[in-house]
Image (cartoon, coloured by chain):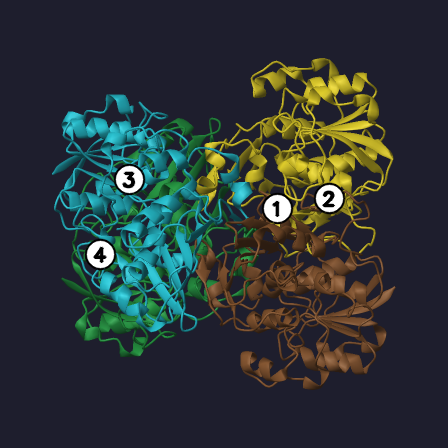
Chain colours: A cyan, B brown, C yellow, D green
């Protein structure tokens, strides 16, 4: 058994991650941290959760674990990653701290100096776009939820050089409210969200933009072409991005996606005529992708996933599995090959 | 007092329209029709509604009214419009039947021959884009909800010749469920919509596309460039469209919008930095528009309105007012100039 | 015109109240206060609201108004009521401060000494249960939302001495989230409420219990019999209470309710067989009541209203109208007698 | 492996049940039936579901299975149960057909003659109230969702003779919309439910009442005392009942519940001061119970469960496990003892 600790267990992502790790056949959870609920049981945060006492991060016994998951706000995460790595403990970091290779870009977007630039670069943990650098890694930067959604939809096009140079790439993304975290703020109160739907940070203003562009640059895309417009949905979880691109030949697009995702266990490329929806993916570790050709050169890709799972916690477990050489879907997909899909909600 | 009748009073649009007409200072409602609830009180459809007995359309006393509103499915509406006009009764048609000038285009998109081609063309009732043809009209085609949303956001750019020729025009639209009507169907059940978010008829497949293109063609846009992607939101009412365009000079855009909407009482052009949301417009007769320049040539327009009001019933009243030479906002905006906005929910 | 000021204009109740007052034919709003948003426009709190600059309470020009509405937390309200009354300004207090006649009871339930005991008792503003003491009053204590819901359902039974002595009186109440206010707290975040439903302070623990018992004691009920169990509904507004009582003769119950509410413009006693729902009342100034006899002595009363309107803001306007000798529904019901019910959402 | 078939796989309960059975270590699903979707894949009903072709019930190969689950409407279920039993196939019936021992009571409440009275009585499958009759049973009647909720809260009081004779027993129950099934009907449309909350069939009018009373009569309760009031919640799943009873000695109540549920793996008796909520149980196979003493003799029991799981599908699996002598929670609770609670949403 691999002993693990989770920092930040009382947020929405922490909750999902603890649930997944508790059910993981190769994992033993050794500690959970929380600053706001330190000393209390995890049950004080989540009804019927396992009765485990939360400890402050400063008290975490790093010598008792093999790996840690960091579900912490940016700037608080990187120093703990450095500390764990120094102690010989592997790290999956779910914050934004280790995703951007260049600390200057980090400072530009997060308005603070990078808290641990000596760690950079860290392998970016989106397994379907390249898992070789993740196998056996000591530290993995778990991607952002919007970034995963956009990248799964765009990377096959960039890699296959199908995008018409210079044409705009438009990602119109919609997210459930859990993406905004669990710290009480006015704009995420029930009465503010119920019945509303609102864009925010549209254009080239959201912090996931440089993360998406960095990965696509590695795949060969020139920077500056991406338009990324997030919106807040009146639901709790799930992200769906409707992506508009101009391609050189729309007839070759499906092949490009099949080449990359054809054998992927956690990415479902939907058959022609079926559009991806949140209903495909919410409360599952899967991403769903659909391709809609509009005319010879115009393509709409719809990419959907659960922001707390494939957009955070289950992708972190995927990365953890790669890190330790375990089967990549261990702890994510049931032992029986049929047991996939949203119906399996209580097993 | 102008005597009116409403055909189709038990749908979501009919409900709103009856409410507005009951409060209209110049209107007397003389009959309401419903096939499914004929013989019952309006109260059987809507709690605490006025206690008015619904009659079948065939029994409607056209000789007792000056005007009728048709809130009926397409194909059922046009024949009644013809009948009313023949009887000297004016018509505001909220169905799709009279919106497209060319019956061949209607047949192409609705898969049936046009039910009353001799009536076409009918003035298209989007007052902010041209009210001269509506003043005193005998019949007005009330626009579709998606069409109104898209047209308010796009027409100023087309009219001002600000769009870069050939570049795609992308309208990513999201609608509350009431847009799908009140006839029980699986995909609009509560349990299907709750927690979901789904695209449908994306690209160039939705029936409001030819309606939008017809109006924009009159403004000078070549056909075939529009990409229109509707999505179903897990809320009851409201439409928000995020519109992506390439313009020749992003700095002149605000002026073009101000020139058209600066004095409009029911269209609110939001100040820079404020994005339009459903919260601006739901349960009001207003549309809200925001302009977000991304770079020198890329613009994002967000257009929002209530699909049942500015997208249907309150726009119908606007058109009715123009038809009869009444103040255009009569029955829509309170007598006191301050009494605008969503706060006025019970007066 | 009567000049008024509203303290606490940026909360949910304040928003509704400002909307109603802006549309009131006899009222001129002279100032709005907010501590958190002082110096900003009301538009910064509510989209498309009137553009009125908010001022801190300390700067409110009491000499420019005839009356004030206090939409403030308890303990902050009573001192301002005292100040206004001393300045000759009439007061409708929507907080809990002036509802309980006995300051000792206040201290017991609110855990602080009463902030202005010299003001007590103040007339309790539930017009349907006795409006004579409200006509011309200088100060009125506006009832709590749960209290209004329970009292409308119970008072006719107590007044008619129909309750079997000693039998328990059970009020199982369910409220939308806006009843919990607009200050960010964990339990009212969207993701906490969406998909949940939860009881709280059940039995004899909620602060509205002594308020309900005080009023019913005046009607003749011995204290201590009421069981009151609130629950939080996953919706924004509305309260529905299902009330279970034992009566001496279930056949006389309807007469007792008709005697009290038969001529009331804002309380709708539903016909036999129709149950009150939130759909009857949300976004209206009406309460709806239904009576369901179960057997000879068991009765279920369902009482429903909008917690922000008949449970707060519209009842405050009712009280204001009584205070100034205006028609009681002025500013609440349209000029046209038919224009009632939920359909009138935008007029 | 035990071969099973599921009749009615495309309803909400069928979906959950298929999901659970697919993940059950001792089960092999051999066929799924659907009349409306016969010939199509299960994927046509549920996104990303296993790709299994649905067959009409008439084509079901009973000779290939050891047991069947019936997720069918009442009257359609019992004849298929009889057919399966005659073929030597065991049956878990999730319909109402086999729950009532007396066909006359069935006819009284369902307004049709019982479709297979020769089968009655059938063991009632609420394991926590008596599993001995279920072990090895050939046929089990799976309880109703409301009935399970009410019975878990009331049975310990009846069995311990703690209820004061003659005092009313009030069950105020609230259910998510999935309890109303998946057949399109007006009252379960999204726009009808969103923002509403409504009582229905309150008092002694709901079909689960005789089922509850039958079980409680076996425990010693005289019939006729139960008041049962269901309400429709604006959420998709979960039932919460707030139960008001008069007991002889409130101090002994907790002991009575602990005696029955202390060792139950799927019923959680919450500690004092914690109230049961939907958040405790939705998407889990658990019921949660809380006890709130109000005074010496008044008790409030809150009982909550997921109507589709402990109220239907997971309870059916529990019963199936007992039927076959398997561990009762097989297929319901993860292999790792910590892996309980709502957090485990994707494993």
Residue B177 visible (yes or no) = yes
- Say which residue label 3 marks: A101
Determine the CA span between mark 2 and mark 1.
Answer: 15 Å
Say few, some or many: other residues with alpha carbon within 10 Å of mark 3 (under 14 / 14 to 19 / 20 or more).
some
Q: Nearer the viewer, residue D151 or B180?
A: B180
Query: How far, Cα to Cα, is label 4 from label 2?
Result: 59 Å
Residue at mark 3 shares a chain with residue at mark 2:
no
The residue that disc 2 covers is C256
Mark 2 Cα-neighbour bin, 10 Å: few <14, some 14–19, many ≥20: some
For marks 3 and 2, give the CA distance.
Answer: 76 Å
Label 1 vs label 3, nearer the camera: 3
- The image quadrant of residue C104 is top right
Question: Where is residue D216 shown, x and y percent of the image?
Answer: 38, 48
> For mark 4, what is the residue?
D23
Q: What residue is disc 1 on?
A: C302
Please tell me how crowded label 4 is: few (under 14), some (14-19), or many (20+) other residues with Cα within 10 Å.
many
């Amino acid at each position: 058994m691999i002993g693990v600790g989770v920092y930040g267990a009382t947020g929405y992502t922490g909750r999902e991650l603890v649930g997944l790790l508790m059910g993981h056949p190769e994992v033993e959870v050794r500690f959970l941290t929380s600053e706001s609920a330190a000393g209390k049981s995890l049950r004080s945060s989540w009804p019927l959760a396992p009765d485990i006492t939360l400890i402050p991060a400063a008290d975490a016994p790093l010598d008792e674990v093999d790996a840690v998951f960091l579900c912490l706000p940016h700037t608080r995460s990187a120093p703990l990653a450095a500390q764990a790595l120094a102690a010989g403990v592997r790290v999956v970091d779910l914050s934004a701290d280790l995703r951007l290779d260049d600390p200057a870009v980090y400072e530009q977007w997060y308005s603070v100096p990078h808290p641990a630039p000596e760690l950079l670069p860290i392998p970016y943990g989106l397994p379907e776009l390249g898992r070789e650098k993740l196998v056996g890694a000591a530290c993995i930067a778990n991607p952002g939820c919007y970034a995963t959604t956009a990248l799964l939809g765009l990377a096959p096009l960039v890699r296959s050089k199908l995008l018409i140079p210079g044409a705009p790439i438009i990602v119109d993304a919609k997210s459930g409210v859990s993406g905004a975290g669990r710290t009480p703020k006015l704009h995420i109160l029930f009465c503010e969200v119920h019945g509303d739907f609102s864009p925010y940070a549209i254009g080239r203003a959201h912090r996931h933009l440089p993360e998406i562009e960095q990965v696509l640059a590695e795949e060969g895309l020139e920077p500056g072409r991406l338009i990324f417009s997030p919106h807040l949905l009146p639901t709790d979880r799930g992200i769906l991005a409707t992506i508009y691109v101009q391609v050189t030949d729309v007839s070759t697009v499906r092949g490009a996606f099949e080449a990359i995702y054809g054998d992927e266990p956690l990415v479902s490329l939907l058959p022609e005529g079926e559009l991806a929806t949140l209903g495909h993916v919410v409360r599952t570790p899967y991403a769903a992708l659909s391709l809609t050709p509009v005319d010879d050169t115009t393509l709409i890709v719809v990419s959907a996933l659960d922001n707390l799972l494939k957009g955070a916690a289950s992708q972190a477990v995927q990365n953890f599995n790669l890190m330790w050489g375990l089967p990549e879907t261990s702890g994510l997909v049931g032992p029986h090959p049929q047991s996939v899909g949203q119906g399996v909600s209580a097993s």
